[in-house]
Image (cartoon, helix red, strand yellow):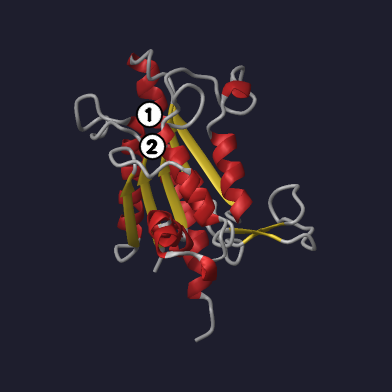
């Protein structure tokens, strides 16, 4: 059974195409998850809506608690870290992260950055060892990605007001969403990263419709290939 973490970061509560003023990124994550369920009805789906309920921001108390060894943490420290522990546990359990994240001002919404800051945790998802020299995904030394213990995939589904932000396009250098998310997740050991975005949201009309259709078709192909990759090895394991 595959476990998916379905996360929506848009503050818009509805889905484009189904609700007035609905979220395009929510439409993409819903499409991915519904297509996955069609292939694997018993897949476990963990859902978290950080667009409507943002994770806590880092604070002095949070930092002090997070950098205190677990055996030395006080009860107030454990309380401060309780939400972060829950968010980390969800990621650790997951095979595929399905992340709906719109581009706001060339990067992610604040709620999603708060989520990232809560799941990149020393001793939980990453560690530091001066003797460790070979990070499997990034050109870093001494950092141990604790989630590199097994294959995990991250699927970033986004929406953009403008266009031409993809790699190789004129505005690629202004895109601080996909590169930052990829770096943070690979830092903790999630090495397989996939991204699909809708563009032309501000322009609307035929350009937006065509971009949306293209994104939905790409999601269909990604679900097909990922499902085959994730489930086939389990089917061929000896009894």
Q: Is residue 73 left or right of residue 168?
A: left
Task: Identify the image quadrant of residue 52.
Answer: top left
Disc 2 + disc 1, Cβ < 8 Å: yes
Across and down, in percent, residue 160 comes to: 44, 24
> Could you tell me which residue is drawn at 45 percent across and 52 percent down?
97
117 or 80, which lies in front?
80
In the displayed image of the protein, which residue is found farthest to the bottom?
A: 239
**Number of numbered markers:** 2
106 or 171, which lies in front?
106
* Residue 138 - label: none
Q: Is residue 79 left or right of residue 162?
A: left
Across and down, in percent, residue 36 comes to: 36, 54
> Where is 238 relative to 142, above or below?
below
Which residue is denoted by mark 2 in the rendering? 216
> Could you tell me which residue is drawn at 49 percent across and 54 percent down?
226
Q: Is residue 218 in view from this perspective?
A: no
167 or 218, which lies in front?
167
> Could you tell me which residue is drawn at 49 percent across and 73 percent down?
234
> Could you tell me which residue is drawn at 56 percent across and 26 percent down?
175
Task: Identify the image quadrant of residue 111.
Answer: top left
Q: What is the secondary structure assignment of the residue under circle 2?
A: helix
Across and down, in percent, residue 91 comes to: 46, 57
User: CA separation, marks 2 and 1?
Assistant: 6 Å
Packing grade of label 2 (10 A; few <14, some 14-19, many >=20) is: some
Packing grade of label 1 (10 A; few <14, some 14-19, many >=20) is: many
Which residue is denoted by mark 1 in the rendering? 212
> Where is 89 relative to 169, above or below?
below
Q: Is residue 213 in view from this perspective?
A: yes
> Where is 171 relative to 15, above or below?
above
- Location of the N terminus (image quadrant): bottom left
Q: What is the secondary structure assignment of the residue under circle 1?
A: helix
């Amino acid at each position: 059974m595959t476990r998916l973490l379905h996360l929506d970061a848009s503050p818009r509560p509805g889905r484009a195409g189904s609700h007035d003023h609905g979220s395009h990124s929510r439409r993409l994550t819903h499409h991915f998850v519904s297509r996955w369920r069609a292939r694997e009805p018993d897949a476990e789906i963990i859902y978290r809506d950080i667009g409507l309920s943002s994770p806590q921001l880092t604070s002095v108390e949070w930092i002090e608690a997070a950098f205190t060894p677990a055996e030395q943490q006080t009860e107030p420290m454990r309380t401060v870290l309780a939400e972060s522990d829950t968010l980390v546990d969800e990621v650790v359990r997951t095979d595929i992260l399905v992340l709906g994240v719109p581009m706001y001002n060339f990067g992610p919404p604040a709620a999603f950055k708060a989520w990232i800051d809560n799941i990149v945790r020393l001793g939980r998802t990453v560690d530091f060892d001066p003797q460790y020299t070979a990070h499997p995904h990034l050109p870093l030394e001494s950092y141990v990605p604790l989630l590199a213990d097994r294959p995990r995939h991250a699927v970033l589904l986004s929406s953009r007001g403008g266009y031409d932000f993809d790699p190789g396009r004129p505005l690629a250098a202004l895109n601080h969403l996909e590169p930052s998310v990829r770096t943070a997740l690979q830092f903790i050991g999630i090495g397989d990263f996939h991204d699909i975005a809708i563009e032309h949201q501000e322009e609307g009309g035929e350009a937006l419709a065509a971009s949306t259709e293209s994104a939905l078709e790409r999601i269909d192909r990604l679900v097909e290939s990922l499902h085959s990759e994730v489930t086939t090895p389990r089917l061929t394991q000896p009894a």
